[in-house]
Amino acid sequence: MTSDGGEDRPDAPGDAAGPVPAPPPWWTDADASPSAPPPSDPPPSDAPPVVAEPSLPSSPLTDAAPPAVAVAPAPALDDPSKGFLAVLRDNVEAVAFALILALLLRHCAIEVFKIPTSSMEPTLFGDNSDTHPDTPGDRILVDKSAYVGRDPARWDVLVFRYPLDWARAFIKRCVGLPGEALRIERGDVWVGPADATPDALHPARKPRNVREQLYFRVYPPAGPRAQERPADWWTPKSTTPGSVDVPAHGRVVLDPGAGGGTATAEYAFAIRDTDRATSDPRLSSLDWFFVSDVRVRATVRAAGPASVTLSWSPGDGRLHRLTVASEGAGPSEATTSGRRVPVTARLVPGRDLDVELESVDGDLRAWVDGHEVAVLADEVPVAEAVRIEGLGEGGTRPTLDLSARGARVELSGVAVDRDLYYTNYRSTLENRPSAGDVLRTGDDEYFMLGDNTRKSSDSRRWVATGVRLKDGTEVLWDWQTLAKHSVVDGRAWREVVDVEGVTRRWRTEDEAPDGALSERRPFVRRDRIVGRAWFALVFWPLDQLLPRVRFIR
């Protein structure tokens, strides 16, 4: 025996007399030379990798055949020994596991709710809403983990347990945060620190994405109104000599004429809190208010050097303007009654320029080509807002103007929107908000409002009625729910579902003589918040599937 690379191998034939030994077990080719031992060096780098096999016990080399090695057969793909019960068990386990995951997901992460009413329009649509008649309500996905590690923010749309019946889930917009004083005046929510005096409150500003969802389109008209004469919506202002032409809804042509005059078109109607594009602006009601928060947009194209101005007067002494001008035709600027800031945008003759003026939440906001170019704070004192709204029609009639100087100007895509106008319930009934009513939240309490402010049961209306029994027990329930009456064995009984969602039953004779209760419950506790609504869709009818798939802001 000689050593080669640390492995034992038989001597070559001719080194010793005697019969040639049987081939060793590592010979696999019957024609291979017995003098060629297996390579001891590793294979080349470009050879396929070698998979190690378990080694077998070595045996002395003899003339006998190598021992047989038992190999277990590979399992069949379809095991006939696996009976029906085993297959059934596997499937039941898989379904049960999927159900457990779904329940955990529903309990901890995401749950689907259906909107049954119109209280959150235009953000969410309920069954048979005014906007989408004869259709089911939106399905919303609620993120239950949204407030793990953080608190709800103002303007979030939340699902929570109804304070007058914990067994029911409500959806509203959060407008008041813990530790705040708040009131509703002239369509806005006014907020401040919990210890603030009523006249020290300021309008709560809404971010852009929330404003986008809360704007109601007023112009151009829609539905039957869209067939009416366009010129009835914009009228020439008699104090300016230029001409005004309204060839179609959404298009206004201003021609100042020769001599450097001005052409001005005035919106023909006062904008009220009940107005929509589908309603008739000529109809009036005793139950409406002039709106102070408005947005107007247009695409401007000038035939030559010119300046264009969008003007909004809310009827409270303020005047908000956005002017864009060509080089040499005047300054481009945003102005309020007492301030002005320059705007870098210029109106180039023959080119389109998108302009937008927002007068909202006590601010003037100017936009040019999708970019916010100016923000000017210009709010009225809260006492003045109370006085104006108390007049019923919101004070002086607001006005909206489009004007041009210099060359002929065409405005296309003209659109007017109004902001959501939160209303107060001005009554002398107990526990109802009224003029000057200031609410103060606790450390873990939130104030909720519905976007469809005139048709929403929210923090403004949540009152529990109840009764005190002779033993001192108090039973409280939703004031909108009537107690059930019954007679058993000649005794009168009353039954209600109380504010905790528990059915309560007692004998009428057990009520204290002066036991009538009434308690206002306008706030939602932090531990009653289920999660944040973040996505909405509807499955039927199919033609509304895509238009109603959207994120909730």
Image (cartoon, grey):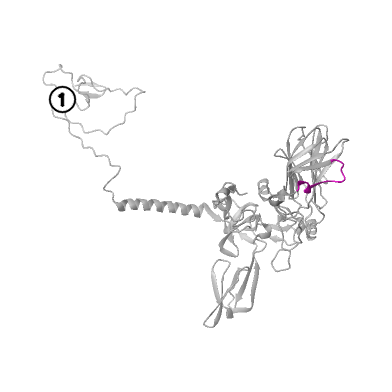
Nearer-the-camera pick, 478 or 19: 478
Residue 213 lies, with reference to residue 165, above or below; the image says above
Q: Quadrant of residue 341?
A: top right
Say which element carries label 1. loop
- Kindly identify which residue carries mark 1: 22
User: In x, y percent, where is residue 102?
Assistant: 46, 52
| Mark 1 burial class by Cα count in 10 Å: few <14, some 14-19, many 20+ | few
Q: Quadrant of residue 330?
A: top right
User: In x, y percent, where is residue 519?
Assistant: 65, 68
Quarter that holds the N terminus: top left
Residue found farthest to the top: 14
Residue 441 seen by the camera? no
Q: Is residue 266 left or right of residue 1?
A: right
User: In x, y percent, where is residue 365?
Assistant: 74, 44
Q: Is residue 297 left or right of residue 551?
A: right
Residue 173 seen by the camera? yes
Q: Which residues are magenta?
A: 229-242
Residue 316 lies, with reference to residue 32, above or below; the image says below
- Residue drawn at (34%, 28%), measured in percent from left and top? 49
Three-letter residue code for mark 1:
Ala
In reply to whether residue 407 is colored magenta, the answer given is no
- Residue drawn at (27%, 47%), measured in percent from left and top? 80
- Residue drawn at (76%, 61%), measured in percent from left and top? 286
Nearer-the-camera pick, 111 or 259: 259
User: In x, y percent, where is residue 71?
Assistant: 23, 37
